[in-house]
Image: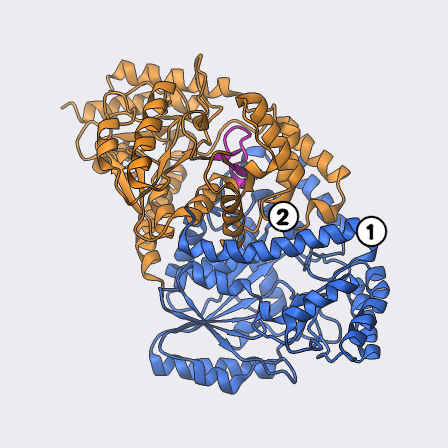
Chain colours: A blue, B orange
Amino acid sequence: MISDKMQTFVSGSSAVRAMFEEGKKMAAEYGAENVYDFSLGNPSVEAPKSVKNAVIKVLEETSPNILHGYPNNLGFEDVRLALALQCNKLHGTDYNENNIVMTTGAAAALNIILKSIINPGDEVVVFAPYFGEYRAYAGNYDGKIVEISPNKETFQPNLEEFEKKLTEKTKAVIINTPNNPTGVIYSAETLTKIGGILKAKEEEIGHPIYIISDEPYRELFYGDFNIPFVPDFYDHTFIAYSYSKSLSLPGERIGYVTIHDKIDGFEDMVSALSCANRISGFVNAPTLWQKVIPHCLNESVDVSVYKKNLDAVIDILTELGYEFVRPDGAFYVFPKALIDDDVAFCQAAKEFRLLIVPGSSFGCPGYFRMAYCVPYETIINSKESFKALKEKFSR
Amino acid sequence: MISDKMQTFVSGSSAVRAMFEEGKKMAAEYGAENVYDFSLGNPSVEAPKSVKNAVIKVLEETSPNILHGYPNNLGFEDVRLALALQCNKLHGTDYNENNIVMTTGAAAALNIILKSIINPGDEVVVFAPYFGEYRAYAGNYDGKIVEISPNKETFQPNLEEFEKKLTEKTKAVIINTPNNPTGVIYSAETLTKIGGILKAKEEEIGHPIYIISDEPYRELFYGDFNIPFVPDFYDHTFIAYSYSKSLSLPGERIGYVTIHDKIDGFEDMVSALSCANRISGFVNAPTLWQKVIPHCLNESVDVSVYKKNLDAVIDILTELGYEFVRPDGAFYVFPKALIDDDVAFCQAAKEFRLLIVPGSSFGCPGYFRMAYCVPYETIINSKESFKALKEKFSR
């Protein structure tokens, strides 16, 4: 009764549901405060107060038929212009409203981009470890994911293998910096190299290869960074952005796509994204949230809370001798599991009331992801469990 | 550069954009009040005040991390339970939260249902005239639309042809009552017959055929009707509902699916819908709106405004001698064009500053759709234009 494509997901989701149910059972048995749940990327820092104020302001000031009515499928023009101008200010672009498509979060953004460009069999390159949903998104359009194996020393992209694996069928490369699950940030040097490799390949094969830059963690970095603006390095770039993390609004599904103005066939591409938004069933990004965003352009959650969490996680993992690449952004750490079988390792961790996610889910077996967007106390209190887990596998 | 599937839509959408631009130009030239735009199904009645109050109440009373955080992909359990209980009260069902999936409007609802059940080549039956987006939605999953030709006397479904066109490949039938574009409502008798035909066919072919009941206009009817509850007539039924019209919130993208509890493999189907919601990029219905809905269960826009509009439209069309089936619901009338070529007819109507949509867009050439969700004055003032249009084609 269920379509063949979905049957696989239904089987897979039973496993996730089982784990979720187990977590709930553990919380009931031991008390929620004694279960250390590092499994979900659900922001723990609250949305800034200004968001609530902006919602009320918009409700008070906008006619309901405008505020809640159908906008253009691309989004309200004034909102898109406000975002274009912000982009111009921050990145020196020359964008207008046509460079911005409001979307139902970054997941919708990625889907409408892929729907607009992918023919069945086209290849979409990803750098392992990568957010597992990319596989499903490409599969929605019968695209084929091509994995570049991880560089485990740094978790920076493996550019030699990348260059080798580009083919005539390569249509897009998804990058994600700051990265889920590793927290690493790609440098300008890395992006220059990626851009150079792609440009040479485009000339060879005679059709565009797009970079799709998935940037929900853009504002979450911990140090003196200047997060590079990807279109500066490569013309055929889309950015998929979300306010899920910068404003802690993941449930509200609000984000946008930027279409770089140097994309060939720019107007048709805007039109394709508009149609894809419509026929995929998104229709338009939720209108109240569209209107709220221009009031919050300079707002952000308190990133120092995540930084404090990160420092605590690093202290604990370092003291206990876990191996990991120090993350610079997002809210994840991706340490090495203590046995090769990361799935068995994460299963064993439950014995100590630790919920962590196997690296296999991210195309990188032998590791685990720890989402530290949790209360600080959860991190501190989990130390004994991480210690016991280490001891279990040191025997 | 654009995928083959999307290329068709991009070409088509240029035509729509051209019409939209023409409308804007006409408004600039003649003044917006002198252009009679009946082309869009954008509700003209404002959302009830209680909606705004509910938004503010929810913002005041809910922790931001709950309100704006990730819920279950199916939606918040308390919200789904509230809707299930309302359904039980109204329709005597025995639903719980598992029978309800919160969705990003009815378009998302239709898409996740189709994604969950359609394999490439499966047939999806629709009764002409029908909402043209069904074609795109089925195409998203490589399903094939099978049209049943219109019964032009009544615009009730043509059940003889329906029975003949069911095949081994039939997977779903989309019904839409009250109907866009005709405004007709299917009677209990009609639904009994449809259910009987489908049940017999299911037994013959040995797999389920689903009714997908698209019900965004459920509350918009003008007379002493009792809109039948489709699952009462057929077990394998999904309902796709939206608050776009009942609460005038089309831009906010909030609706739900009901999965009837007598659907075979119920649990797997819920799981498929959940996965489809996630991987299509919806992830979850916007959370603020999910939380608002239970506060507005007994609310509705002022339907008498649409009734007054309908009466005025009927008076004008009748007086001028246009032929049409009297609509009982939704906010559309679907009269016969005055020449066979409905596209040319709608083009000619622009000469009189009338914007109407060709029946061809709904699989029913020779007719036009008039959306009367406009200010009352627009209808009254359009009379001279409809008169001139009639005279033009009576020469």
Residue B210 x/y as whole percent: 39, 38
What residue do we see at 46% from left, 32% from top?
Answer: B216
Question: As rendered, which of A108 and A344 lies closer to the eye?
Answer: A344
Seen in the image, is A22 located left or right of residue A212?
right
Residue lying at the far front of the rendered structure = A395
Identity of the amino acid at label 2?
Asn
Q: Secondary structure at mark 2?
A: loop
Query: Quadrant location of residue B301?
Result: top right
Provide the chain ID for the residue under circle 1.
A
Residue A221 x/y as whole percent: 71, 70
Q: Is disc 1 surrounded by few (<14), some (14 to 19) or many (20+) residues within 10 Å?
A: few
Instruction: Tell me whether the residue at label 1 lies in contact with that at label 2, contact meaning CB atoms closer than 8 angstroms.
Output: no
Quadrant of the image containing the N terminus of chain B = bottom left
Q: State which mark lies toward you, 1 or 2.
A: 1
- Name the residue beneath numbered marker 1: A31
Quadrant of the image containing the C terminus of chain B = top left
What residue do we see at 83% from left, 70% from top?
Answer: A312
Residue lying at the far bottom of the rendered structure = A160
Question: As rendered, which of A117 and A80 lies closer to the eye?
Answer: A117
- Name the residue beneath numbered marker 2: B72
**What is the distance, in whole Å, between disc 1 and disc 2 at their CAs?**
21 Å
**What range of the chain is rendered magenta?**
B239-258
Provide the chain ID for the residue under circle 2.
B
